[in-house]
């Protein structure tokens, strides 16, 4: 079982705050943090658009009656 993305992001931020990282470890952690942040944002956007689409299905008659 994998950790939730927000927990992974928090752990990477804590790791980056560690001053004992080598430049390569810091670079790898930063790259992974950027990837997870983008993935987390993508999941939030997917959830938002799914909600909008479900709203549009419920209100399809009202939307069809709009004059534009």
Image (cartoon, grey):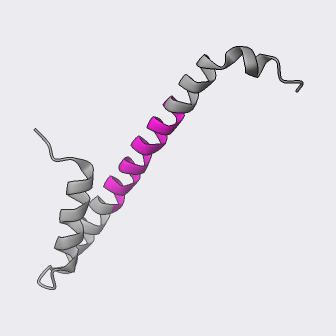
Q: Could you tell me which residue is drawn at 82 percent across and 18 percent down?
A: 65
Residue nearest the viewer, comparing 30 with 1: 1
**Where does the C terminus fall, quadrant-wise?**
top right
Q: Residue furthest right?
A: 67
Q: Position of residue 45 (x, y in %)?
A: 48, 42
Q: Residue furthest bottom?
A: 19
Residue nearest the viewer, comparing 51 with 6: 51
Q: Position of residue 41 (x, y in %)?
A: 42, 50
Q: Position of residue 30 (x, y in %)?
A: 29, 68
Q: Could you tell me which residue is drawn at 35 percent across and 61 percent down?
A: 34
Q: Position of residue 10 (x, y in %)?
A: 23, 63
**Most frequent secondary structure within the magenta stretch:** helix
Above or below 21: residue 57: above
Q: Could you tell me which residue is drawn at 40 percent across and 53 percent down?
A: 38
Quadrant for residue 61, please give it: top right
> Which contiguous range is marked in magenta?
34-50
Quadrant for residue 53, please give it: top right
Above or below 46: residue 64: above
Residue 30 placement, left or right of 56:
left
Let me know if residue 35 is in the magenta part: yes
Residue nearest the viewer, comparing 57 with 41: 57
């Amino acid at each position: 079982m994998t950790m939730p993305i927000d927990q992974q992001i928090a752990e990477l931020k804590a790791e980056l705050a560690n001053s004992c990282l080598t430049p390569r470890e810091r670079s790898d952690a930063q790259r992974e943090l950027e990837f997870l942040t983008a993935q987390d944002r993508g999941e939030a956007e997917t959830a938002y658009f799914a909600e909008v689409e479900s709203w549009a299905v419920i209100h399809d008659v009202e939307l069809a009656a709009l004059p534009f």
